[in-house]
Image (cartoon, grey):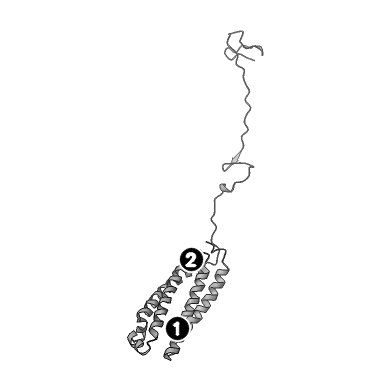
Amino acid sequence: MNCNTCGAQIPEESQVCPNCGNPVTPVVNATPVQQTPVNNGQPMGAPVDGSAFNYVPQQEPLGMKWANFLGYFVLWIGALINLFSGVGFLTGTVYNAAGVTAEEVYSYFSALKPIDTIVGVCTLGTAVVGVMAAISIIKRKANAGKLVCALYAVNFALSFVYALLVTVMTSIPGFSSSTIIQLIGSVVMFFVNRYYFNNRSDVFVN
């Protein structure tokens, strides 16, 4: 090997250069480090990490348009209508559309006043249930379907009982065409929503 200072050739076992007298520093041969090729920040051939790929959020299952239509529009409109109807029953203004006042009606049929009061309170209750059902749909709550079905069941019961009582107590047919349509609509909506929400129990889980 050669001296690091003067370059003179010296024996392998010598620790001092015989030419210049400087100590000899042995040269250590460095082993080259093999570079591993990388791709997108990961070694080639290494297990693929899913985090290296762009995450695509899963979209909500198809068939939710009806639920959104109920939650963002129908139930809110229905709650607003029930709110005004409930106030109308409690105050007697529900009869104004027929061109008579509540005092005139109650003077002939005094038993209608407590019935109107009860129906008015129950109708206000359905307005609250409608708002709760709408919020449950929006938040994908597990009880959304039950609230919607309960709402239409109560609407049917109120309309049917009230029409029956009016017919019995006043001898005036309470089952008008509009009342019959409302009753049929409540029945249809009950079964349609029951089927709809039962088939989407994997979506409404919160």
Tag shown at residue 41: none
Asked whether residue 101 is in view, the answer is no
Q: How far across and how far down the image is residue 116, in percent?
A: 40, 81
Q: What residue is shown with label 2?
A: 136
The answer to the question of whether label 2 and label 1 lie on touching residues, with beta carbons closer than 8 A, is no
Tag 2 secondary structure: helix
Identified by mark 2, the residue type is Ser
User: What SS does tag 1 mark?
Assistant: helix
Instruction: Specify few, some or many for label 1: CA neighbours under 10 Å numbering under 14, 14-19, or 20 or more.
Output: some
x, y percent for residue 70: 48, 70
Write down the quadrant of residue 97 in the picture: bottom left
**Above or below for 76 versus 174:** above
Label 1 belongs to which residue?
162
Q: Position of residue 89 (x, y in %)?
A: 38, 80
- Residue 195 appears in the rendering: yes
Q: Quadrant of residue 36?
A: top right
Image x and y of residue 53, in percent? 56, 49
Q: Quadrant of the N terminus?
A: top right
Report the front residue among 163 and 137: 163
Say which amino acid is labelled 1: Tyr
